[in-house]
Amino acid sequence: MLFHSSIRKELARTFGATLVVLVTIVISMVLIRTLGQASKGTVNPQDVMLVMGLTVLGYMPTILTLSLFIAIVGTLSRMYRDSEMVIWFASGRGLAGFLSPLLRFAWPVLVVIALFSLLVWPWTNQQTAELRDRFERRGDLDRVAPGQFQESGSGSRVFFIDKDLANGGSSKNVFISTSERGKETVTSAKSGHTEVIGLDQFLILNNGQRMEATVGKGEIKVSEFNEYSTRVGAAKLGTPDERPIRAKSTRELLAEPTRPHQGELAWRIGMALAGLNFVVIALVLSSVNPRVGRTGGLIFALFTFVVYFNLINLGQSWVSNGKASLGGFTIGLHGGALLLGLLWLAKRHHQWSPRRPWQRAKAPAVAEAAR
């Protein structure tokens, strides 16, 4: 009991500290990126915190896996440096004996990683996609602040109004500059109001002037109007089939096993299985050579994590393109990593060495020659 409790207590402290640090780093990076997207007009500034929270939740499988991996490597490496591992080995505990307390500590984290990968990941992507789609598909006048020049969602028009027209009110001094299809148009009117016709929103201008110029030709056409209408509203929202694959639930991916869907399944299942493999890999990578230094083993462990994670992303592309099957890739990568980790663990536990058979065969001959 002392063996199990001492390891799990230290693992819990290291895992909690690592998780807090990684979450803080990810929040800072996501906040900077989300603010940049809001400044470009792709994210509603009022939804910045919500989008940031959903994005961080989507990253939680990777954060939890990396935190667990670093916690195991860091804890066991510290025990090697302080000679605690030597004491446990001398008391009859082999390296494979550490696998049981590690799994007893890690299994709740592995369950949470699987839930985040299979359930929370598609939900967060769906919510984020809906927020961005709703913001991008709003009417052009919804983007305009009274008294300010504002670009439309497509970037082809610039609006200026004196009063908010979004709620069906009227305004004076309306200005619209349009650049599309090789023509530049400037439209101004003394007043304007909005009307909804069918599924679209139209801006009705009264008593204005329209100037149209062809780019590169120098031709200018000026006309006056009593009433002029232009569509400024958005079409109806997209159908569920237009959602990105990342926003589709795991049940939907299983119900329609197309190649892109199987590629997404390969990533989600891979993140759930990778956590288990990283427990075994961290156990065999935790030994520290005092001559290398404290950071040598940790750098190699992080390099292993990066390679494994990139292989998961690469496998998603392979399965989506038909270069590999879902079952073949899952068994090949994750089954192969688990088998390699267990063989490596057995080698270190039993102290297997390719020199030992040769040394054992040579020892009787040396003894006989000594006689």
Image (cartoon, rainbow, N blue to C red):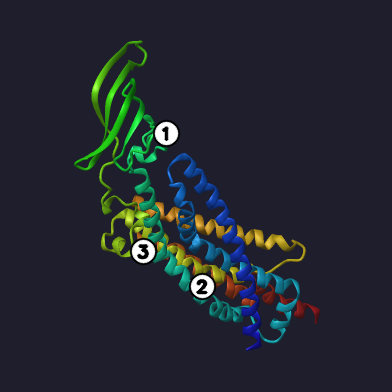
- Residues under labels 1 and 3: Cα distance? 51 Å
Which kind of residue does numbered mark 2 sit on?
Val
Front-most of residues 139 and 154 = 139
Q: Position of residue 288 (x, y in %)?
A: 71, 67
The label number, if any, that marks residue 109 in the structure image = 2
From the viewer's perspective, is the residue at label 2 or at label 1 nearer? 1
> Sequence order check: which comes first, mark 3 or mark 2?
2
**Position of 137 relative to 335 (above/below):** above
Q: Position of residue 86 (x, y in %)?
A: 73, 79
Q: Quadrant of residue 292?
A: bottom right
> Would you say 254 lies left or right of 362 here?
left
The label number, if any, that marks residue 150 in the structure image = 1
Q: Position of residue 99 (x, y in %)?
A: 57, 78
**Position of 143 relative to 65 (above/below):** above
Name which residue lies at 70% across and 87% down.
Answer: 91
From the viewer's perspective, is the residue at label 1 or at label 3 nearer? 1
Q: Which residue is mark 3?
A: 327
Which kind of residue does numbered mark 1 sit on?
Gln
Q: Is residue 339 visible?
A: no
**Position of 34 relative to 264 (above/below):** above
Front-most of residues 78 and 235 = 235
Q: Quadrant of residue 272?
A: bottom left
Element carrying mark 1:
strand
